[in-house]
Image (cartoon, rainbow, N blue to C red):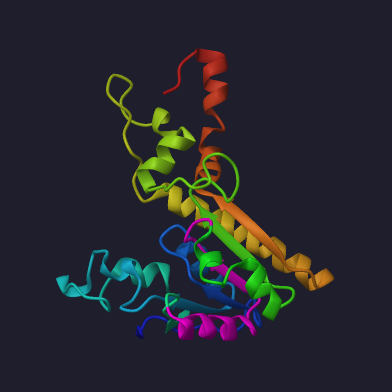
Amino acid sequence: MGDRTMTAPTGGALDGIRILDLSTQPGQYAGRLLADLGADTIKVEPPGGDAMRLVGPFEGDAVGPETSLTWRYFNANKRSVTCNLDLPGGRRLLRELARDADVVLESYGPGYMESRGVGFEALRAVRPGLVYVSISGFGREGPHAGWQATELIAQAASGVLTLSGDPASAPQMLGASQACITASLSAAQGALLAVFHKERTGEGQLVEVSMQEALSIAQETAMQQWDFQRTSR
């Protein structure tokens, strides 16, 4: 499934770096940022296309997988391929793509990729030195690793809801998918550091990003406000 806006750039700091972007909403901005830096970023979509293709607004108010402006923004400068990880052929295709990749970016949650035989260890076996960036709601380890996280859940768990809204009313959800965007920023930063390390040492690594932890940075001044004013918002 192609998109006329998804043309890969040439030149840039990441020229010569190839990225496989299997991420859903929490990671697609990371792929966009890396593509903007010159990486050859391939968006790997499930059959029928990524769910964000049906997120508005739409060009000309025509709802469809090729007209989502949200999709175009978060996936500009990427190429696209369809891959069904539920089928053996799809998993073989991903392993073949990984042979020439420097970075894999995914946000399916702990255990999903491993259950299909295409997790970090499996892909590293076919591509030594691979940088594997995994985004999840609460990390890959710990008591909450298996918990699912929507945008609202991540905002609440990170504590930022206590900073928003009128103090006389209930907390209000922040706009513009702040948890997803912040997780993407952390993922892009982690990928850049890991690629830099790989260029120097040849070593790949697993980079873990928790949406909850990433958004917790918004609490940076909340503690100071409590110390000085004994108020949270």
Q: In the picture, which quadrant includes the N terminus?
A: bottom left
Name the residue nearer the viewer: 228 or 75: 75
Name the residue nearer the viewer: 10 or 72: 72
Q: Position of residue 65 (x, y in %)?
A: 26, 76
Query: In which quarter of the view is residue 58 placed?
Result: bottom left
Q: Position of residue 39 (x, y in %)?
A: 59, 77
Query: In which quarter of the view is residue 221 placed?
Result: top right
Residue at image x 48%, y 37%?
158
Q: Position of residue 196 (x, y in %)?
A: 74, 67
Can residue 33 be seen in the rendering of this structure? no
Residue at image x 62%, y 58%?
189
Name the residue nearer the viewer: 2 or 46: 46
Instruction: Report if residue 188 lies within the magenta region.
Output: no
Q: Is residue 115 above or below residue 146?
A: below
Using residue 27 as the reference point, say whether residue 151 is left or right of it: left
Using residue 209 as the reference point, say whether residue 80 is left or right of it: left
Residue at image x 38%, y 50%?
177
Extreme residue in the right direction = 201
Q: In the picture, which quadrant includes the C terminus?
A: top left
Using residue 138 as the reference point, say whether residue 70 is left or right of it: left
Q: Is residue 100 above or below residue 50?
A: below
Q: Which residues are magenta?
A: 87-110
Instruction: Report if residue 103 lies within the magenta region.
Output: yes
Can residue 204 be seen in the rendering of this structure? yes
Q: Position of residue 163 (x, y in %)?
A: 42, 29
Q: Is residue 184 above or below residue 8?
A: above
Extreme residue in the left direction = 61
Name the residue nearer the viewer: 63 or 165: 63
Using residue 35 as the reference point, say whether residue 81 is left or right of it: left
